[in-house]
Image: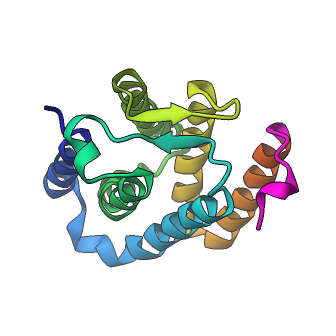
Amino acid sequence: MINLNIIYTLIFIFAAIKWGDWRNWKHYYPTFLFWIVVDLLYQFLFFQYSMWEYVPVGSDKAWAKHTHITLLIMLIKYPATLIIFLGHLPGTNVKRFIYILFWTFLYVAIEKIDLILGGIMHKHGWNLWWSSLFSLVMFTTLAIHYKRPLIAWVISVLFSIFLWNIFNISQSILK
């Protein structure tokens, strides 16, 4: 029986070992913390009104819930992604844009596989197109955070306000 999240975890660990820039991990650590804080904030604020929910697939059902999968993603997928993404980030704007598009495509492809296998469920009008925009903004913001953290925080707040208004989210979801 498939154990989707363990397979993803092993793939990301292998990729980080093979392609990660381990010599500079301390330089990437603040961006990793930024990513974690933003995701934890989302998980906290939208606990009762999530735009997507991870669903255990196959033998994952024996141990996982949305929270377990989210923590696994935060603790394995995010650092593995960052150590590769920031470690190979090109210097020129055109190459950087293409590189960010590559990572956006990769994350959207993984989400598409999750949708096909039933490992994620979109809710409240969220769909793969919104995930594509979200991933594009996310990778752009991560690249910006690495050199200019305050600008990345401003972008994150503005994009969050944009999504909050586009999806017409009621203040009543907050405790």
Vertical comparison of 139 with 115: above or below:
below
Name the image quarter holding residue 75. Answer: bottom left
Residue drawn 33% across and 54% down?
Answer: 77
Decide if residue 169 is in sight here: yes
Q: x%, y% of residue 142?
A: 53, 57
Which sits in the foreground, 168 or 154? 168
Vertical comparison of 2 with 149: above or below:
above
* Residue 81 on the magenta segment: no
Position of residue 40 in the picture relative to residue 78 (left or right):
right
Vertical comparison of 1 with 37: above or below:
above
Report the residue that reaches farthest toward the top.
Answer: 116
Name the image quarter holding residue 124. Answer: top right
- Would you say the magenta stretch is mainly helix, strand or loop? loop
Q: x%, y% of residue 95?
A: 46, 39
Q: x%, y% of residue 148?
A: 61, 69
* Residue 173 on the magenta segment: yes
Residue drawn 85% across and 44% down?
Answer: 165
Decide if residue 146 is in sight here: no
Residue drawn 51% across and 43% down?
Answer: 53
Which sits in the foreground, 39 or 155? 39
Position of residue 94 in the picture relative to residue 169 (left or right):
left
Q: x%, y% of residue 38?
A: 59, 64
Which sits in the foreground, 86 or 113? 113
Which sits in the foreground, 97 or 118? 118
Which quadrant is home to the N terminus? top left
Which span is picked out in magenta?
166-175
Which quadrant is home to the C terminus? bottom right
| Colour scheme shown | rainbow
Position of residue 149 in the picture relative to residue 107 (left or right):
right
Residue drawn 34% across and 78% down?
Answer: 26
Q: How many marks?
A: 0
